[in-house]
Image (cartoon, grey):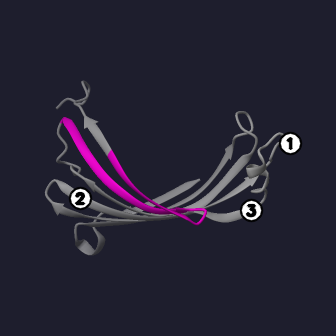
Amino acid sequence: MNISYTQPYLLGRDIAAGFDIIRRFSDYTQNYTYDQERTGFVLRAGYALSDNLRQSLNYSFFADQITNIQSNASIYIVEQRGLALPRDRAVDHFMIAATPGSIRPGLYPQPADQLAAWADEPLLQAIAKAQYYFRSPTAGF
């Protein structure tokens, strides 16, 4: 289950704000030795820095519960049995070099950084992504 809501113009301004509520069950017993239930939420906000550049901030929090552990599972998996502990917490910051309506065919870089904690271990990472947009032959423009 994933419930998302975004208000694209908060208080009549070009500020987008939203949230996601996530509850996901993953059956890993075919390839691994356990099942996982993930519950959490994401709070999102973004605003325009210029006509073609947006900045966004996200805060996410997730708790995982490991169940249905098989007899041949690693000791590290067995130690997780039944625990519903906060596992992932993160603050993401990223830039989008295109906004809806301004996208033209081409490559758009998306630099990002993330300050996170996984199982109480801090993590700071830099992320470099890019999106490539092209004209669809059926779009008619």
Picture residue at 79% right of the left edge, 52% below the top: 78
Q: How many marks?
A: 3
Q: Position of residue 84 (x, y in %)?
A: 70, 63
Give the Cα separation between the discs numbered 1 and 2: 49 Å
N-terminal of the pair, mark 1 or mark 2, is: 2
Q: Are marks 1 and 2 in contact (CB under 8 Å)?
A: no
Mark 2 lies on a secondary structure that is strand
- The disc label shown at residue 119, or none: none
Residue density around tag 3, few if under 14, some if 14–19, many if 20 or more, within 10 Å: few
Q: CA distance from mark 1 to mark 3?
A: 18 Å
In the image, the segment drawn in magenta is: 105-128
Q: Mark 3 is on which residue type?
A: Leu
The answer to whether 137 appears left or right of 70 in the picture is: left
Residues marked 2 and 3 touching at CB (< 8 Å): no
Closer-to-camera residue (95/117): 117
- Residue at image mark 2: 54
Residue under label 1: 71
Crowding around mark 1 (Cα neighbors within 10 Å: few <14, some 14 to 19, many 20+) is: few
Q: Amino acid at mark 1?
A: Ser
**Left-right relation of 92 to 134:** right
Image depth: mark 1 or mark 2 in front: 1
Closer to us: 71 or 48: 71
- Tell me residue 122's x, y (percent): 51, 64
Question: Judging from the image, what secondary structure is the residue with disc 3 in?
Answer: loop
Mark 2: give few (<14), some (14-19) or many (20+) Cα within 10 Å: some
**Quarter of the figure that contains the C terminus:** top left
| Residue at (21, 63) in percent of width and height | 48
